[in-house]
Image: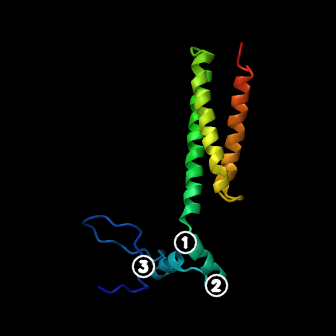
Amino acid sequence: MKINPNDAVPASSTTGTKTRIDPAAPSFANVLEKTFVTPQASPTTRSLVVQSIARPAALSAATQLFQGTTRTLDAMETYQRLLADGTQSLRAVEPAVRHLQKELADLASLMPTVPDGNPAKEIALQTMVTAATEITRFEEGAYVA
């Protein structure tokens, strides 16, 4: 079977029925061109692509930072849920605060591994500020009635 680049791409097909080709549907060539055509890469762009492929550690660091941020946010949600529960004493909330402190310290240790300007780093920084503020409020007795 030979594919003609001017063949139309069917909108959908159902089993047992003949597919009607919509004349308004884009041709296969147009879809292929829009999907795979990229601007001509300059030598600088090519070197950046090679460099990014050669350094998976940078991607790994950003992924680790993202995962650390997620763990810190999960710890904050647990802390928030316990704090909002009227049946829990502050002594019952304290282990969640300690866990949040541990996640915050782990997240802080990952920050230097990710370059400045990375969106994950900015989100992690905001998460760290919020977590540190909540830990300080708890330790200073802001929730003591």
* Residue 43 badge: 2
Q: For the residues labelled 3 and 2, say whether their Cβ atoms are less than 8 Å apart.
A: no
Rounded to the nearest angstrom, the CA distance separating label 2 from label 1 is: 16 Å
| Element type where label 1 sits in the image | helix
Find residue 40 and report its horizontal and vertical position in percent.
61, 84
State the residue in front, 45 or 20: 45
Mark 1 or mark 3, earlier in chain = 3
Mark 3 or mark 2, earlier in chain = 3
Residue in view at x 68 percent, y 41 percent: 128
- Tell me which amino acid carries mark 2: Pro
- Tell me which amino acid carries mark 1: Ala
Q: Residue furthest left?
A: 16
Q: Which residue is mark 1?
A: 54
State the residue in front, 1 or 6: 1
Find residue 52 and report its horizontal and vertical position in percent.
58, 70
Can residue 25 be seen from the camera position used here? yes
120 in relation to 85, above or below: below
Can residue 76 be seen from the camera position used here? no
Q: Residues within 10 Å of mark 3 (few under 14, many from 20)?
A: some
* Residue 8 badge: 3
- The reply, left or right, for residue 23 in relation to residue 39 is left
Residue in view at x 43 percent, y 74 percent: 22
